[in-house]
Amino acid sequence: MENLLVMHNQQAVVSSLNVAESFEKRHDNVMRDVETLKKDVLNFEEMFFETTEPDRYNRDRRIYLMNRDGFSLLAMGFTGSKAIHFKVEYINAFKAMEKELTQPKALSEKEQLMASMRLSLETAEEIQDVKREIAEVRDIAENQVTLDHGEQRRLQKAVAIKVYEIESDPSGQRRMFKELYREIKDRFAVASYKDVKRKDLQNAIRYVDAWLPRKVS
């Protein structure tokens, strides 16, 4: 009986013509029964779909397509042992097609190969994207991030040790602090020692350790 079902809007349906033939009814009577349901069923258009189909003279005639719920509602009024037999056959056909529609379609060997290639390509592209993002983050970390508070304190301490090491006079110390901080800014092209890049901290400390004031150089 499943060959009596067709697809419409991605669901299995049966036509009023096939229902009339299977249940040995006049098609106009089946259409009348459907029209009667249309008056009383609120969600009629979710179960029945009006369309046309050519007759044997190739003339368009009105028919209804109905999904399983629509068929069940219509066939509810069909009586007799033969009608019951056909009801069961139709319901089973609906169930079989709906089960087939919900199962994943098996891929051919070519389709599997194509899917695998697409997955590999997508994975490669994702890896490249991640690498670019890592490189961007590394660039920011290395070339844009400046000293945090703790690192600033380390540089300040290195400057203080160097100044106090070579100058005991307070006025001379003040001058050397200014001179050394100025040279740090010039050496690392920053507006303040706080703007020294994190990646340059060790170089800045080594520069301070090796620094000599101009008057004794």
Image (tube, rainbow, N blue to C red):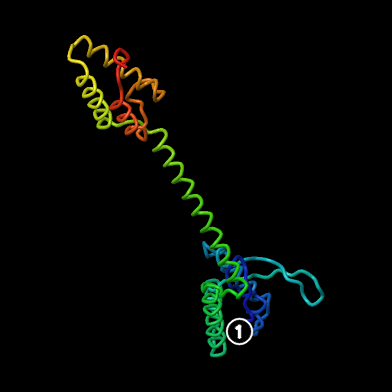
Instruction: Kindly give the residue lying farthest to the right in the view shown.
Output: 57
Left or right, 29 with reference to 97? right
Q: Position of residue 34 (x, y in %)?
A: 60, 70
**Residue 28 occupies quadrant:** bottom right
**Residue 10 occupies quadrant:** bottom right
Image height of 181 relative to 120, above or below: above
Q: Name the secondary structure under disc 1.
A: loop
Q: Position of residue 68 (x, y in %)?
A: 54, 74
Instruction: Kindly give the residue lying farthest to the front in the view shown.
Output: 217
Residue placed most toward the observer, 120 or 29: 120
Amino acid on which disc 1 is placed: Met
The residue depicted at 19 percent of the width and 20 percent of the height is: 164
The residue depicted at 54 percent of the width and 90 percent of the height is: 81
Residue placed most toward the observer, 166 or 105: 166
Left or right, 97 with reference to 139? right
Image height of 79 relative to 117, above or below: below
